């Protein structure tokens, strides 16, 4: 069936599908349609940069999933998914970005053929790529169906990682360490930012420990000085200035699994306010790691972090982390739990988070972060092993 | 206002806004909400990898646009948009990926404050990032508003490129040429695919002719042999095998502007069927370039291409191109015109397309493509200047 074997064992895919079906049963769904490419990959192994057109996986209570997408991408499905070829369905190319027809008209036909026209159907209403028009088209073409919001149903099933997944994330972590090592070593005043990014990409894709690197779901973010007040600016060709901080927000990626890691480099002698912020942040990270235990809640991590920051006069308004693992652009987060004071989600062994308390102040930014694994007992394990501090290069 | 100046002149932004307002007037819109990051950038200069959370630009008939997004990303807006700081509005961080509240509740308030609760509002219903839930939330929170589909309103305004934009695309084309040159030169049997990709990224981001390279909206696609039957597979760490074709689908990117270019390398002696396909494809490309003239239609290009392919027994079902220019992931296309037999859109001087007649057959794939500019008169200009053929390395 496929030359390019799926990443995981049959038993692993079977466990995943069982989790999803349990959640479907709780919502009494006859059918779940999943357009999120990370969820598609997690359940079927499908891999390809084809999520810019409509595609998805149909999950059923009692039969193998159906991959559905554009005709030319069915070739990619034949080569990457674990299901038999007859479980791959496709729509004609003239549905793509047409003003006359919508791919969801084809999907509606397939859904009717599969479960009839009165089924209870779960849809990922809050998701990249499943557009408002996709929803409206399905609603029009499935007038008898009961369309239910199943946002994050699969994402939540992905929360606790298997041993196979954790092994992938450890490989991603080796790549993350290599990228950060290279950035810290190469950063110097006068070096054009894009040159530094080019080297970081080289490290990311060459990989580490003999394992090849995949593309991360977010490009390297590394703003400098006042630009680092904004967390999501990308690079340009200006040289790195002396006497400024640059943070590096990156992730290695191994077969779509991530282990984000952020560190900050100061070129020169850091001012006292930055050093005080660093000390408070590191103290907050240590406290948060200690609070990141099975049985505690997401908010416990956020509150442990906040205490030393508040003492240092730093008021962080943003959440300080989110689950990570398998992902496609535009985000490496799983979009379920948020590490913030209002989130009461209970931490379970095998959950993985990017503990990400970035500081974005008026004139500078500071990021020191960890990808963490919740253990059976004790404080969280950091998947990367690099000094938890701001690197100063005088 | 901003240290990081927008990419274009004030006059250019003013012309763009005038085009959008004309289209808004034709639909009698009081307000247009634009979530597409490419459309946001085109109108305001906003740049940042923040499109994984809800954000957008509010366009009004008679006042400057309003940037709206997450609190921490407002810092990025202050540093990249041309509007005054008071035109930047943000929502609190606990709206992000929350199960209790949705950012569109905040946007609905801002819309009511701006145009009242009975306005006629245009929305990009078919777009990445504007989710079904976003639409349903706005509809619930703006019960008196008349919500209209304004899909591709801005995308269509972007179709004819200005001289400033074409200058950017020419810079992107120099980077595309450099990437392809490097790939063709480095490809050899035994080279791990990810090593080749790492070098391609280095070329893309280092840039060309002294200009820095930005990240392309699609990662390099370069499947080999039977994998090349699927257009959108990405790389892995396997060595390039002898006696196979690999196609390279890449684009240089200069300040978010693209000029995609695809070429194919055969390592060994190509079989006769591949050589015949190459000859027919090149003949079709030449015929298509000649048909790509102002006043002709999109379908004329597709039909000119199809004739020699059909004579060679090749039936291409897919469209053979799309407009390109400014873009963010997941696509470098503009999602308006498609080069296909049913598309009657008239070609205008200044339009730019990726003329992309990829062949994805059962056992191999072949891509030889051009980014083209429709001229005032005569056949289209190719922005890249590289031999239009399959490269054979014996």
Image (cartoon, coloured by chain):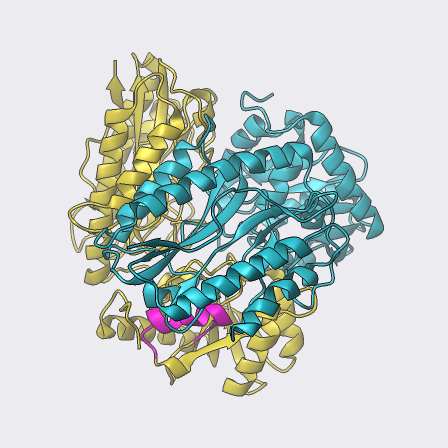
Chain colours: A yellow, B cyan
**Residue B196 located left or right of residue A227:** left
Query: Relative to the observer, which residue lies in front, A75 or B357?
Result: B357
Snapshot quadrant of residue A167? bottom left
Q: Residue at x 54, y 50 (%)?
A: B370
Please say whether residue B386 is visible from this viewpoint. yes
Snapshot quadrant of residue A347? bottom left
> Is-magenta flag for residue A68?
yes
Could you tell me residue A124's position as x and y percent? 50, 65
**Residue B201 located left or right of residue A376:** right
Snapshot quadrant of residue B201? top left
- In the picture, the quarter occupied by the C terminus of chain A is top left
Residue A89, compared with residue B157, is above or below; it is below
**Residue A354 located left or right of residue A29:** left
- Residue extent of the magenta highlight: A67-83
Residue A9, compared with residue A341, is above or below; it is below
Could you tell me residue A342's position as x and y percent? 43, 47
Please say whether residue B328 is visible from this viewpoint. no
Residue A243, compared with residue B301, is above or below; it is above
Q: Residue at x 46, y 41 (%)?
A: B176
Label tally: 0
Could you tell me residue B314's position as x and y percent? 51, 73
> Is-magenta flag for residue B204?
no
Q: Residue at x 44, y 26 (%)?
A: A237
Query: Relative to the observer, which residue lies in front, B311 or A211?
Result: B311
Query: Relative to the observer, which residue lies in front, B238 or A62?
Result: B238
- In the picture, the quarter occupied by the N terminus of chain A is bottom left
Query: Relative to the observer, which residue lies in front, B4 or A212?
Result: A212
Could you tell me residue A249's position as x and y percent? 35, 36
């Amino acid at each position: 069936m496929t030359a390019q074997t799926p990443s995981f064992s049959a038993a692993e895919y079977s466990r995943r599908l069982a989790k999803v079906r349990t959640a479907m049963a709780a919502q009494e769904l006859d059918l779940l349609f999943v357009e999120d490419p990370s969820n598609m990959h997690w359940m079927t192994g499908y891999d390809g940069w084809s999520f810019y057109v409509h595609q998805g996986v149909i999950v059923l209570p009692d039969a193998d999933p159906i991959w559905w997408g554009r005709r030319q991408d069915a070739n990619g499905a034949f080569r990457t998914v674990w299901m038999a070829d007859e479980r791959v369905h496709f729509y004609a190319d003239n549905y793509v970005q047409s003003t006359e027809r919508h791919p969801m008209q084809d999907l509606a036909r397939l859904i009717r053929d599969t479960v009839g026209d009165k089924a209870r159907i779960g849809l990922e209403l809050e998701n990249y790529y499943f557009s408002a028009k996709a929803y409206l088209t399905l609603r029009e073409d499935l007038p008898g169906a009961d369309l239910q919001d199943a946002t994050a149903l699969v994402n939540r099933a992905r929360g606790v990682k298997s041993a196979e997944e954790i092994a992938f994330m450890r490989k991603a972590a080796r790549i993350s360490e290599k990228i950060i090592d290279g950035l810290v070593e190469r950063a110097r005043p006068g070096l054009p930012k894009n040159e530094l990014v080019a080297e970081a990409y080289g490290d990311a894709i060459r990989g580490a420990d003999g394992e090849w690197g995949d593309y991360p779901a977010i490009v390297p973010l590394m703003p400098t000085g006042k630009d680092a007040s904004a967390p999501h600016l990308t690079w340009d060709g200006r040289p790195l200035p002396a006497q400024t901080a640059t943070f590096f927000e990156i992730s290695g990626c191994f077969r779509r699994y991530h282990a984000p890691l952020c560190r900050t480099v100061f070129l020169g002698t850091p001012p006292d306010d930055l050093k005080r912020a660093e000390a408070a942040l590191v103290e907050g990270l240590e406290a948060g790691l200690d609070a990141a235990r099975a049985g505690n809640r997401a908010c416990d991590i956020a509150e442990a972090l906040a205490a030393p920051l508040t003492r240092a006069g730093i008021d962080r308004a943003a959440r300080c982390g989110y689950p990570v693992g398998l992902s496609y652009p535009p985000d490496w987060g799983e979009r379920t739990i948020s590490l913030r004071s209002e989130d009461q989600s209970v931490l379970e062994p095998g959950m993985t988070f990017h503990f990400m308390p970035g500081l974005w102040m008026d004139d500078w930014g500071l990021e020191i972060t960890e990808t963490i694994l919740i253990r059976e007992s004790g404080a969280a394990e950091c998947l990367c092993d690099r000094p938890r501090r701001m690197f100063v290069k005088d």
